[in-house]
Image: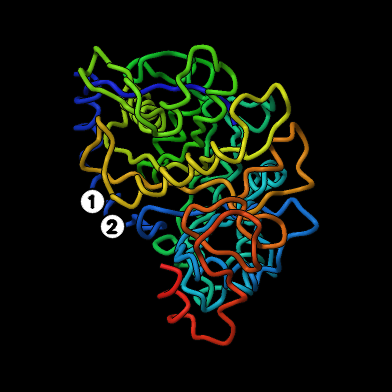
């Protein structure tokens, strides 16, 4: 979770030429592309906690909330078994700790997939494998070097199993991969990152995978509250910013961050690659030095984000490509290290009640102000009837 708030620039001649160099691969991309995301709204199901509901209860919660997409950061068998038959699409994580081993040979990747993915298909809708998390731009340079070979071995193993058109291979990035620049159109990948990022992007373009970015207006605001308008970060009314390069106006930081990723991709030679937000959210509590971390701001951000994603609209620079995002996170996670904010990103509290009201209901009654029925009060009603009352 690193911060920048950037955008995108118009297609340069170099990027334009690059597109035609890649033209022969378009049919490959189309034929092998996996649509791992239904609609526009998803949620990250983090589980670094000892007090959150069971996976079976989580399935109930997600279905009641009509959330069809989720990401986990491992391939926990209890979770994957609980999701069987739910219809909820799930991306599993191949943890950073496995990358060096997986990069050595395809047989290692095959063993991992045969243990953690193949046995649960097709009942559990595993639609993707996230190979590592926030590798490039972080401090472990050895992982930078093994990320691409690990991703290639995972994809090759999926191909041998005939699963490459069912299960997407990707790798989420933090904004640490970008140079800290403004406005959005000025965004570029860091020079030290680019030598590793470009071949990774080339591979993902060939197999039809999108670019996943963890975009947090909260972190940008927390790091520079004196110069960032909190209303701009929260999707509230504000003057916004003008990008002179593209002549585009941004009235919220989230869209500027998404277009920043498009700008960096374009300059790297990948103007047609889709950007999907793999994490975004706002902390409901924080330490005294964590500006903006409170329940009201978290509610405002997540409620406005949900409304914005529901419109299925694009960004100022990519108006025809609907923005898709996974919110971080489903629950507050009491065992996460770091500042207080890290343990308070949940839409729901540990007991399954809502952290604040953005239109969802919880597994138990909540002290948070809400006009919604708590899930248990629905009693023995059918799921369909419950959903009618909830929405």
Mark on residue 326? none
Between residues 210 and 181, which one lies in front from this camera angle?
A: 181
Q: Are marks 2 and 1 in contact (CB under 8 Å)?
A: yes
**Badge 2: residue crowd in 10 Å (few <14, some 14–19, many ≥20):** few
Q: Quadrant of the N terminus?
A: top right
C-alpha span from label 2 to label 1: 6 Å
Q: Nearer the viewer, residue 167 or 326?
A: 326
> Which of the two residues, 69 or 151, is positioned nearer the viewer here?
69
Task: Classify residue 246 by image quadrant.
Answer: top left
Residue 378 locus on image (x, y percent): 55, 79
Where disc 2 sits, the SS reads helix
Q: Residue at x 52, y 25 (%)?
A: 177
Position of 100 with respect to 156 (left or right) is right
| Location of residue 208 in the rendering, given as x and y in whole percent from the top left corner | 35, 48
Of residues 225 and 313, which is closer to you in this image? Answer: 225
How are the colours assigned in the image? rainbow
* Residue lying at 66% horizontally and 62% vertically, measured from the top left: 352
- Identify the residue position indicated by label 2 in the image: 31
Q: Image point 43% across, 60% down: which residue?
A: 164
* Residue 298 drawn at (x, y percent): 55, 40
Residue, disc 1: 27
Q: Quadrant of the C terminus?
A: bottom left
Label 1, residues with CA under 10 Å away: few <14, some 14-19, many ≥20: few
- Which residue shows up at 51% across the image and 36% down it? 214
- Residue 106 visible, this orientation: no
Q: Give the left or right position of residue 31, taking residue 343 as reference.
A: left
């Amino acid at each position: 979770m690193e911060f920048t708030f950037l955008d995108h620039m118009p297609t340069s001649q170099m990027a334009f030429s690059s597109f035609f160099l890649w033209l022969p691969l378009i049919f490959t991309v189309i034929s092998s592309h996996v649509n791992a995301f239904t609609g526009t709204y998803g949620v990250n199901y983090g589980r670094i906690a000892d007090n959150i509901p069971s996976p079976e209860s989580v399935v109930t919660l997600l279905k009641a909330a009509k959330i069809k997409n989720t990401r986990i950061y491992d391939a926990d068998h209890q979770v994957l078994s609980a999701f069987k038959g739910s219809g909820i699409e799930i991306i599993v994580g191949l943890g950073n700790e496995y990358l060096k081993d997986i990069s050595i040979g395809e047989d290692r990747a095959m063993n991992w997939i045969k243990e953690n993915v193949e046995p649960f298909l097709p009942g559990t809708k595993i639609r993707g494998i996230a190979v590592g998390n926030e590798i490039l731009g972080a401090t472990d340079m050895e992982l930078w070097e093994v990320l691409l070979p690990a991703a290639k071995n995972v994809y090759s193993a999926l191909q041998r199993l005939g699963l490459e058109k069912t299960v997407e291979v990707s790798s989420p990035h933090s904004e640490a991969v970008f140079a800290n620049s403004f406005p959005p159109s000025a965004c570029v990948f860091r020079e030290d990152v680019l030598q590793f990022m470009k071949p990774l992007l080339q591979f993902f373009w060939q197999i039809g995978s999108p670019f996943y970015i963890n975009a947090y207006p909260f972190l940008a605001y927390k790091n520079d509250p004196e110069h960032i308008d909190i209303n701009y970060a929260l999707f509230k009314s504000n003057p916004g910013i003008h990008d002179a390069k593209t002549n585009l106006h941004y009235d919220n930081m989230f869209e500027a961050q998404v277009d920043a990723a498009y700008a960096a991709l374009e300059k790297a030679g990948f103007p047609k690659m889709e950007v999907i937000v793999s994490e975004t959210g706002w902390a409901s509590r924080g330490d005294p030095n964590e500006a903006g971390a409170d329940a009201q701001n978290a509610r405002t951000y997540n409620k406005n984000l949900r409304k914005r994603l529901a419109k299925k609209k694009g960004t100022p620079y990519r108006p025809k490509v609907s923005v898709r995002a996974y919110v971080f996170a489903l629950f507050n996670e009491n065992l996460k290290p770091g500042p207080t904010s890290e343990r308070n990103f949940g839409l729901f509290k540990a007991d399954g009640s809502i952290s604040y009201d953005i239109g969802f209901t919880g597994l138990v009654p909540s002290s948070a102000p809400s006009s919604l029925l708590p899930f248990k009060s629905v009693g023995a009603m059918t799921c369909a009837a419950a959903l009618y009352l909830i929405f």
